Image (spheres, helix red, strand yellow):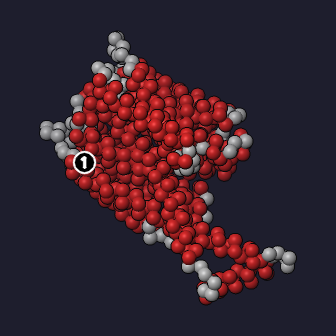
Amino acid sequence: MSVTRIAKIVIAITTISAAIMELIDVSIVNVALNQMAGTLGASIEDISWVITSYAIANVIIIPMTGFLAGYFGRKTYYMGSIVVFTLASVMCGQSTSIWMLVFWRFVQGLGGGGLLSTSQSILFDAFPVKQRGLAGALFGMGVVLGPTLGPTVGGLIIDNYAWPLIFNVNVPFGIIATYLSYRFIESDTPKAEKPHIDWVGIFLLAAGIGALQYVLERGESEDWLESSKIVWSGLVALIGLISFIFWELKQKHPVVNLRILKDTNLAFTTILTFIVGFALFTSVFVFPLLLQRILGYTALATGITLLPGSLLSLVVMPIVGKRLQAGTSPRFFVAFGFAIFMLFGILMSRADINVSSAFFAIPLLIRGAGLAMLMVPLTTLAVQGLEPKDMPQGIALNNMMRQLGGSFGIAIINNYVAQRYVIHRTDLVANIYQGSAQLYERMSVLTQGLQAKLPVTANVQNQVMQILDLTVMKQAYLRTYLDAFLFSSAVILAVFPILFFTRKKKNSQPLNPAEAEEIAGASH
């Protein structure tokens, strides 16, 4: 279709902004949980449902976007998703109880999950074939920037305003995006004969994915198999997902066409995309903990530290897109991206308690370049050999695997951190023994300092022991977080050989998947 230069710019701004807005909301509430709990009179355990409910809705809806866009029409579904997301944001900001907030966060997740794949397809639809490498790079920037900017924006708002603003800030952007979508995005007409609605498939998918997401999000906090809720949720996830797979393979009009996984490129690439989600979300999760919990950074300072790497992604992604357009194999970029992302984890593991912010500059720049080399090439590789009618489902599955990779990653890293902390603390405590010259010297310095500051009646010895305990805890967590970076690199190394099972399809154009994404979300 023909799109004017102005319309292309507006559509690009609209779709990328909508994607960033959705991805920011995945992580923006993390820094506001304490304030929310205090205002709503909720426990930390209950307030964590604000995160869990959004994630569950998000992961459920993503694989269904192709079907829903085909049923309602892509433009209608896209605008509807923006409206639902915006209205739910308003209601989140107006919530007066924890469970009211949890409910509207779930609704917000349903709207937000529909934005990612649909935004991507609309953006590609606005660009001619020769410019779609650039369009893919622009969208990839949004995917990287969203999770990175979330904690920064949230920290800025919480430091200066109240928590409802983290939701209300979406309202003007949602209104503008709805108007621009109505004005500039070309309407598409769904088929006159509506496709069969696979209600059983939808139920099994919602039950299986929802229960799995609950296990991943809450397993660590509820002590995994020690909790009956986690055990039962795990059984529901197992039965639901197995039943979903068998059911969908038998359906003529499945809600998710799993048969397309017979394409080896898509099947193997979804595993690689899962690992990208793992690496992206775990690094964004562990890095702020290291800076804020160990090095004393504020939320805003942490976000600013992350920005240079994200800005480098903005520079590298268009270059990658142009090279793909010129015929460079996406496998080259994926291999190089994984390699330098592993290097990021190795460099981060060399930090110590005295490092300055300058130490993180090179590792974070490496991370930014690595992500830029993974996002667009993996999408290209995933759907390279699919038929046009299968593109929407392929893209949706790929997006879902990235989100699931992030959920798995955070759950695994949480468990890993808990175990490694105990090991490191035990090792450190074992080195503290009576008669140690270093211990005696440290306690003498602390005692003299406290005696000069505290009243004579204060229990100085008790204060000294508390300080020593906090020092041990801080060192144990530092070593644990550094181990977590190495663990992430090891996971990437373990799955790296999968890349060699993918192959370039015969007679496929370099950006054929990007071309096909113009119909992602259309009726098939």
- Residue behind mark 1: 330
Where 272 sits versus 88, above or below? below
Q: Is residue 43 left or right of residue 290?
A: right
Front in this rendered view, residue 64 or 330: 64
Q: In this image, 185 relative to 296: left or right? A: left
Residue in the image at 55% along x and 33% along y: 106
Q: Where residue 78 sits: x, y (%)?
A: 44, 27
Residue 167 on image: x %, y %: 61, 38
Residue 186 visible to an observer of this rendering? no
**Residue 382 vertical placement versus 341 (above, below):** above
Query: Do we see residue 51 in this rendering?
Result: yes
Q: Please report the residue visible at 55 percent of the width from the left and 62 percent of the height from the top.
A: 291
**Which residue in the rendered view is the most extreme toward the top?**
192
Say which element carries label 1: helix
Q: Residues within 10 Å of mark 1 (few under 14, many from 20)?
A: many
Is residue 326 shown left or right of residue 311? left
| Residue sitting at x 47%, y 40% | 234
Residue type at mark 1: give it: Pro
The quarter of the rendered structure image containing the N terminus is top left
Residue 412 point in image, percent of width and height: 46, 52
Measured as percent of width and height from the top left, residue 442 is found at: 65, 83
Q: Quadrant of the C terminus?
A: top left
Tell me the quarter of the picture where residue 513 sits.
top left
Residue 185 drawn above or below residue 427 = above
